[in-house]
Amino acid sequence: MIPVRFTDDVADLPTHKFGPSSLTWWGIISFMIVEGAFFMLAFAAYFFLMGHEQGWPPEARKAPDLLAGTLFTIVILLSEIVNTSIKKAVHERDIPAVRRLMGVMVAIGVILLIIRGFEFNSLNVRWTDDAYSSIIWALLLLHTTHILTDWFDTLVLWALIQTRLGYEGRRQVDVDENCLYWRYVWLLWIPVYLMIYWIPRL
Amino acid sequence: MRRRVRPGIALVTLVLGGCSIQNYQSIYGNAAAEAQQFNALFIIFLVICAIMYVLVIGFLIAGIVRRSRAEPANVVEDGRHHETNPLLRPGLIGWGALIGTGLVALAIASFFADRSMANAAAHEKLAIDITANQWWWDVTYNSADVSKSLRTANELHLPVGVPVRIRLHSNDVIHSFWVPSLAGKQDLIPGRDNDITIMPTKVGIYRGQCAEFCGTQHAKMALVVNVDSYGDFIKWWRHQLQDAPTPTTPLAMSGYQYVTTHQCSLCHNIAGTPASATVGPDLTHLASRRSIAAGALPMSKGNLYGWVEDPQSIKPGAKMPTIGLEPKELHAVVAYLETLK
Amino acid sequence: MTDAVRRSNALKSRRAAEAERRDIEEDDKRLAAERKKIARDGPKLTGAKLEARLLRTWQRPPGIIGWLATVDHKEIGRRYIITALSFLALAGVLALLMRTQLARPDNNMIGASRYNELFTMHGSTMMFLFAVPVMEGVGVFIIPLMLGTRSTAFPRLNAFSYFMYLFGGLLLWGAFALNIGPDIGWFAYTPLSGPQFSPGKRADIWAQMITFTEVAAISAAIVIVATILKARAPGMTLARMPLFAWTMLVVGIMVMLAMPAVALASSMLISDRLVGTHFYNAYEHGDALLWQHLFWFFGHPEVYIIFLPATGFMSTMVETFSRRPIFAYPIVVLALISTGILAFGLWVHHMFATGLPRVGYSFYTAASMTVAIPTGLQIFCWLATMWDGRPRFQVPMLYVVAFIVTFVIGGLSGVIIASVPLDLQLHDTYFIVAHFHYVLIGGAVFPLLGVLTFWYPKMTGRMMDEALGKISFWMVFLGFQLAFFPMHFSGLLGMPRRVYTYPAGLGLELPNLLSSIGAFVVGAAVLLFVINGIKSLYIGALAPDDPWGGSTLEWATSSPPPPYNFAHVPVVESKTPMWDQQGEMPVITGLRVDEKETLLTTVVAAAPDLREPVPEPSLWPFIAAIAIGVVFITSIFSPWSLTIGLVPCAIALTAWFWPKEIKRNPEPVIT
Amino acid sequence: MSSRFRANLTIIAAAGLVLSACDREERHSRSKPIGETVPAGQSPDTIYPGSGTPPPLDARAKLYDNNAPAIAEGQRLYMQMNCVGCHFHGGGGMGPPLMDDEWRYGGRIDQIAATIAEGRPNGMPAWRGKLTDDQIWQLAAYVRTLSGQPSKDAVASRSEEMSNTTPQTLTPREPTKTSDTAEQ
């Protein structure tokens, strides 16, 4: 063992911070990179398949109906208002507000999942019809898994935040990062929405 | 230096391979314009790469030899590990420049090789369709006059000196068409149309082989390429256009009976007979070919017996089933097949 | 509801909130008082007393439960390495079987289908179950030690990643043992791997093995990247980071970007096979080439994911044994990063024969060749370091020389096949087999064997036998050349890859026989290496802390390191802290000793940033891995398992995340 | 530890699933020795309306029924021998549909094999002597999958061609009726 020379004392460093200081933030960002790569490649596959075709959808299939998808888009975009309020509340450590707003987010998640069910119904194709059908089903399913996982994550966190641990800084960081992830989920939805509903109508 | 020995052995194999094998299936075949282009370019690459390799190994050896020098070095023990020999920085820049130059030279060389191959491809005079199946090649010679179009299998005849465009299709999985003595490879992909242009320059017999893994019998999916003089090629074409001869001996006749009424006719076509299926290879001029079952066996009476009797032990997994012919039937079938010259 | 009731309810809840806030404020005061009493390392608590207390805190529970629950990166790293080496041995045995079959022309020892299974298993095992995991395993083991931290980031994710990897490997080999192993090649081209031409479950097992190993590799990559970015010792700026950490950072990011491609491709394949989608069905607007694009978008970076950590090994060993810091450190770092970026632009060069537009040929050629520049510069830097230093040729350094001699041949043959006109001939021949074995064995396995010898004392506390090491080195080196050099000629003589036999008379007899003999020499050498490893574990000389005179922090702690890695977290003031410490190691003080805690620093400057509580051992990562594993395996048989199986997965993951007691501590604890 | 116990159970269950899959994957490149043929007339081509005990299942049935490679080969033959011409993709046309659960001549694999080998009145030709026994059994194995009878694990979800039917792996499985007396 080499003899040591003492320098800084770190005892007064905090154990949590919001944003890039925390490991949670890096975990979420890494996860986003992985998911993003997955989505980008799925988009690439979509355009690769589209590139072969004279018409899109091929064989003059009917493009998906707009209603459910557009409704979903509006709701998920509006949910960002609640999401931003949560972020703000947690940064101000206003725990009762966070508890309340997260409840709203959980409810929004349920609504979104229900609308998503109708969306699958309005695609006008089954995934077994052809490659076009397969890829739009795949995109929608892929995004649904994100809604589902983030909704479940919000639910668990919401339950946790009801306890005294709501006042624990590291849990607040978790809430903050959960909001960040939700932004990512709706951001991803925009290209998916365009690819499923609008590109086949061009 | 023991390492000197191994390249030596390898060099011997190279020379042996290059000479004694008669370029049957070898990149040194040089039997077409494309293969010649390849070899010229390959030599340029080998020379430049060899120079780079010698430089690297030279530097390595210099480093090893230099370790026993007497003067202080830039090392921890001498307390000088934060210093750097002034030769190294310019050396690094020079090395980078050298690699860059070498790569540019090589890229330009391949650009020109590719251009000249592309130019040759623009002047094709004959078009052939090859459709790959698990595990055999279906070959069609197309002519504007439909009566002169012809279908054969596992054997390709090309006229020397004529650029030929071969259109490549697949009926099942991805295969790759590759006759090393003539040209590089090109994949046959279901749902896509590829092609390759070859201009053979040397009369001879060459072997090609599927180069993309295509299932159980990928290893036994070969084809024979005959590069003929133009006259021989036309003669061959005319001969192939004829229907199968009517059998003359009683034995062959009973073989004819069996082949056209039993299992064989459900998959194979023999022009001029009731056997007209297209599932398996065309057998009209089977006996004129040099191999059986996509290069699995050389053509001979004995091998025909073996193949017809039990294809599954020769090429396990092949789509031709073992029928279990009675000896009498077997004699007859082989006798008939032998007449399909 | 009347107004009055609503108002009284609002009042009630406001009162409750008020009460809670008061409660919390009181609690805060109590916690602040308790916080002062927490024991921390420092001048008052150091030496044997500190070590005893740290050991008590950091030690995992004994027994099988503790073994499954551990989150110690050293244990997990060792497991990763041992498991990966076992798979290397298994895949090596398959290679020997294949070489036996190919030793003579027209050989019938192994049938066609069995041979196809053998090369599929060999390739898949080597790529997915050996090469990537072993590199990540070494990274997981050594990176925290090199960086001077007590733990990796996300230690439970790390444990989870190992179990996923293990289950994936067991799935593949279990299936092989039960005769339902895949037989479609490690690249599984559609439509051969599709529902029609690969009946049964063989291809699905391959595809799900991919999913397992992808999850494992991505998890490990996240752990490694977050550790490197956030957990470095204070003062270890990015510009002072050891080169191996740089390589693992680049590799980690590459894994995150590349692995999703194959995960997507194999998910599409499974859905084609199971629920009848048409992604790869050319007759229903799909495209068989979509598979190849996705697969090689992963497959090409994969090669660098394997190779770059090996360059990190090289830099470490060259530096240590040349007794001189690596020459042109910034150039090496830039070379690493540019290799990482270029790797994503080159996937097309695996597809030259698929009928790409001809106008692109020259572009592909030039793009594929550019990757030779950064690699060439790195090689120069290593050679310059040796030349300028005073190299000592102990066993690890021999492997460095073997790397240069071998890898450069592979690199140069890589330049040859980067040229489209040349590749059209050489593609899918034994020339390619020779090329990538020169690159992967010469470029990755040789440095790996070297670095295992190098870090063996850090892993086990004992030295490997030098004489045996030298014998096995020469055997593996010469045997390798004998096995693979002739393959260049088999390829030039027209031998395609993945054939179970070849006819006599094509001139292939001699090169194949030589290759087979060489393969057995390599097999014997690896066996000797393993024997050396096992023997030294029991009767090897005891290793000092720093047996080689290394430059980086892993040599500052004992061999093997204690569960907490460093009694005091060191402070770094140069690139080679161990060479510049002048008999005294600067350290920080003030980390807890009663609970597991480590220090986080800022990303670039590595200034102390946060104190991070480190999770206690937990069984949940193991249980979650099992729950997810069951979903993956059963989804081979029915799509419903994905929905039903989600429930246990969600339970396991929630339990993993959920704190064991709902109680506030003076400072957070992760149990 | 109950959680560990549960974990072990799931592993065992998964292993069981895998094990049960083994013989489905066996490839028989040649199913019987050369020269051996089935004696005609011993095939179970008798009709068993409602009651009556069918003869014991042919021993070869287990080689083909549920065997993935055999089903795949059968599928190929179904296309190549133009069974589609009359039966379409199982939906029926000139010939009876094959994707329902009604079998005029028995829905067991050996009964289907007999139907293919011997032919049936009203247009079904006899394939004995045209196809080998091996191929007839492979066809029978495939035809059986059309009605969703065998385990779906051995069936391909789709083939590399135009398709206008739902994947066989997604069609509901129906119980076998050995015959349909009403239509006789």
Image (cartoon, coloured by chain):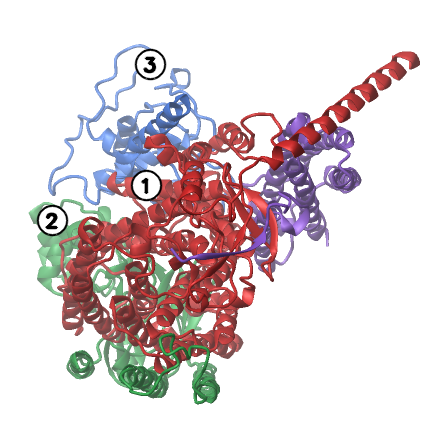
Which residue reaches farthest front?
C44
Chain to which mark 1 belongs: C
Question: Relative to residue C276, is residue B322 drawn left or right?
Answer: left
Which color has been applied to chain B in this rendered view?
green
Residue of label 2 = B329
Q: Nearer the viewer, residue B207 or C601?
A: C601
Residue C406 lies, in percent from the top left, at: 29, 73
Counting other residues with Cα less than 10 Å from the Cα at mark 1, is it few (<14), some (14-19), or many (20 or more)?
Answer: some
* Chain painted purple: A
Front position among marks 3 and 2 = 3
Dots 1 and 2 on the same chain? no
Residue C17 lies, in percent from the top left, at: 78, 23
Separation of residues labelled 3 and 2 (CA atoms): 41 Å
Q: Indicate the secondary structure of the residue bearing disc 2.
A: helix
Which color has been applied to chain D in this rendered view?
blue
Vertical position of residue C343 compared to residue D116: above or below: below
Residue of label 1 = C170
| Amino acid type, label 2 | Glu
Chain to which mark 3 belongs: D
Q: Which mark is residue D49?
A: 3
Place residue D177 in its image quadrant.
top left
Which color has been applied to chain C in this rendered view?
red
